[in-house]
Image: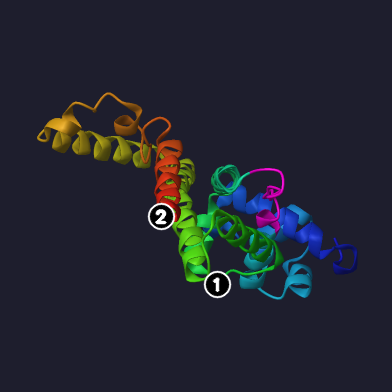
Amino acid sequence: MPRDTLTQDQIVRTAVELLDAEGLEGLNMRALGQRLGSAATAVYWHVQNKDNLVLLATDQVWGELALPDLEAVGWRTAATAMATDLYAMFSRHPWLVQALAAHVLYGDGKARHDDHSLAVYEAAGFTGARADQAAAAVFTYVLGNAAGAAATASLTRKLNRDDATAEEQLQAAMAKAQQIAMGYPRLRARLETPAATDYAAAPDKAFEFGLHALLDGLEQQIAT
């Protein structure tokens, strides 16, 4: 595809698809050009470099997030909806967790989300730095929970790329981890749960439980 028939939007959408499939480590201009049926040089002409492409792709997926109407719902309902939506977005695009650790990310999509998040906690009664702290506490909680899904996606890609030896190594590592857990009574009692048998898994409803507790704490902060 000649460069004058490509558009930046087309390139960014295809980059998101490639990132979803191959992760941050699988993104390069050659692979992207192959998906677009174009030379890598034509892609460079539109997006400058890989770092800029990651920035554009990140801001596009940030635009998927809905912003609750604070005139229609209370702050806690809005905070829960935004946190749940953010967690779902990280789960759809686990490479974004990698990108947050490796790139300085900004753009209109992220700014739109961050500004509304601050509005939610200001509506709750927090002001100034306290609103910043509340928003940051919830964001980092969501990000921390999403890290498990990102690790699982990365490991799955590795296992799919490598031969059976990698799968055998994982099973051996999990077996050793379970052997170690046998020496600790609380871990031993949980060895048959999904959180113990699946890599990076969490107990059922763990995200909802933690988010509810965090918002309870913020509500208490307001009351006092």
How packed mark 1 is, by other alpha carbons closer than 10 Å (few <14, some 14-19, many 20 or more), is few
**In front: mark 1 or mark 2?**
2
Q: In this view, does 84 lie to the left or right of 223?
A: right
Q: Residue at x 58, y 62 (%)?
A: 118
Residue 204, placed above or below residue 144: above
Q: Quadrant of the C terminus?
A: bottom left
Q: Main secondary structure of the magenta part?
A: loop
Measured Cα–Cα span from mark 1 to mark 2: 31 Å
The numbered mark at residue 104 is 1
User: What is the secondary structure assignment of the residue under circle 2?
Assistant: helix
Residue 186, placed above or below residue 118: above
Comparing 183 with 73, the one in front is: 73
Q: Tell me where residue 168 appears, x and y as whole percent.
A: 32, 36
Chain-order first, disc 1 or disc 2 = 1
Comparing 22 with 212, the one in front is: 212
Give the residue furthest to the left: 183
Question: Which kind of residue does numbered mark 2 sit on?
Answer: Gln
Magenta segment includes 67: yes
Q: Quadrant of the N terminus?
A: bottom right
User: What is the secondary structure assignment of the residue under circle 1?
Assistant: loop
Q: Tell me where residue 26 appears, x and y as whole percent.
A: 56, 57
The numbered mark at residue 221 is 2
Q: Tell me where residue 69 appears, x and y as whole percent.
A: 71, 48
How packed mark 2 is, by other alpha carbons closer than 10 Å (few <14, some 14-19, many 20 or more), is few
Q: Tell me where residue 213 appears, x and y as whole percent.
A: 39, 42
